[in-house]
Image (spheres, rainbow, N blue to C red):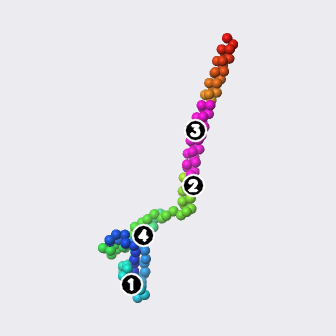
Amino acid sequence: MSIFISGEKVSDTKFRVVFTHYDAEELEKANPEAIKQGFVIESMPEPEYREGFYGVAHYNTETNVVFFEYEPIPKTPLELLQDESERLKAENALLTEQTLTALDAVASVFEQLLDVQTQLAELKAGGESA
């Protein structure tokens, strides 16, 4: 049994398959004009499994061969939210670390200022008793 495919032209010799009818003869009987808008092939291969990708059928008009190109599976809205949550957590941890480092620096400067004030008070007290 012949298979009818049609699709979107990618180049002069390459079409992306977007429609497959597994009984070309029946389709031709029902709609003779439809057969003129595609290609009749003898078999349709199955895409191979590739984790995170899906196969997109293409047809080469020079070799009359169906082949697959693999595209990444788009992330779901939930996956996108999870990615954003992880990114924000990492950013928050970095900002927290930077804030703590800055607060440590401020505390160190404050301690030095207190030491200087204490030394200045001692100098004034020593100068007044003489």
x, y percent for residue 121: 66, 21
Sequence-earlier tag: 3 or 2: 2
Return the disc, 1 or 3, that comes first in the chain's sequence. Answer: 1
Q: Mark 1 points at which residue?
A: 33
Name the spot of residue 49 as percent of width and height, x first: 44, 67
For the N terminus, the quadrant is bottom left
Q: Can the viewer see residue 54 in this picture?
A: yes
Label 3 Cα crowd, 10 Å radius (few <14 / some 14-19 / many 20+): few
Is 70 or 80 nearer to us in this picture?
Answer: 80
Residue 50 drawn in magenta: no
Residue at the image position 42 percent from the left and 66 percent from the top = 70
What amino acid is at disc 4? Val
Q: How far apart are marks 1 and 4 (CA)?
A: 25 Å
Q: What element carries label 2?
A: helix
Secondary structure type for disc 4: strand
Q: What stretch is highlighted in magenta?
A: 88-110
Secondary structure mostly taken by the magenta-highlighted segment of the chain: helix
Q: At 61% from the left edge and 28% from the top edge, which residue is drawn?
A: 112
The quarter of the displayed image where residue 117 is located: top right
Residue at (64, 27) in percent of width and height: 114
Task: Read off the residue under disc 3.
Answer: 101
Sequence-wise, which precedes: disc 4 or disc 3? 4
Residue 25 visible within the image: no
Query: Cα distance, mark 2 to mark 1?
Result: 52 Å
Residue under label 2, please give it: 85
Whether label 4 touches label 3, CB < 8 Å: no
**Considering the numbered disc 1 on the image, is that residue within a helix, a strand or a loop?**
helix
Residue 7 placement: quadrant: bottom left
Q: Residue beneath label 4, please?
A: 56
Determine whether 51 is above or below 6 in the image.
above
Q: Nearer the viewer, residue 69 or 29?
A: 29
**Amino acid at circle 2:** Ser
